[in-house]
Image: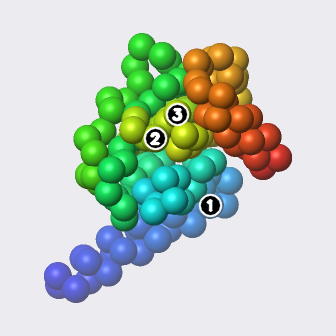
Amino acid sequence: MGYVIQKGRYMYLLLNILTLNLLGVSLAFADTVKIDFTADDSYSLEVAKINVGDTIEWIPKNKGHNVEFLAGPNMKALPKKSDLDVRHSITFYLPGIYLYQCTPHGNMGMLGIIIVDNNFDNMDSVENVELSRVAKSVLQRLIRKAMKKK
């Protein structure tokens, strides 16, 4: 009897999934993108494109690095700066562009950009962040790279 009930539940679930797919409703699952701190004082992925609800996880493969956000769609609610040499993850719920740096190496250009839901509405806030000349040059390269992927 228990087998018949379980089999019925699975069939019911399968039927619901098929019905949703036929109606054009897709079941999306959030992704996790992993970014390493590299020995070259850079992030292994400098421009990440993700969807709302996805997570970025930074992994300390090299010592002396962290993640500090400089700009985002809501400047008052930027994620907190991570500690040095620790695994750090953030799930993004607000579309837009996020600019981050490694605090000790930001002036040398250790920057990254995250684009959530392909939304570039807050590009001005990213471009207007005060950076060193080297970091500003790196930022311009990252923006060009991000716009190519648009």
- Residue type at tag 1: Asn
The CA span between labels 2 and 1 is: 47 Å
Q: If the image is split into quadrants, where does the C terminus sit? A: top right
Q: Earlier in the sequence, mark 2 or mark 1?
A: 1
* Circle 2 residue: 105
Left or right of 89: which side holds 28? right
Left or right of 136: which side holds 66? left
Residue furthest out toward the top: 76
User: Is 108 drawn above or below residue 20 in the view shown?
Assistant: above
- Residue type at tag 3: Asn
Q: Residue at x 45, y 30 (%)?
A: 69
Q: Closer to the camera: disc 1 or disc 3? A: 3
Q: Residue at x 41, y 66 (%)?
A: 13
The CA span between labels 2 and 3 is: 6 Å
Left or right of 108: which side holds 2? left
- Residue type at tag 2: His
How did the renderer colour the structure?
rainbow
Q: Residue at x 59, y 26 (%)?
A: 132
Q: Secondary structure at mark 1?
A: helix
User: Is 42 drawn above or below residue 68 in the view shown?
Assistant: below
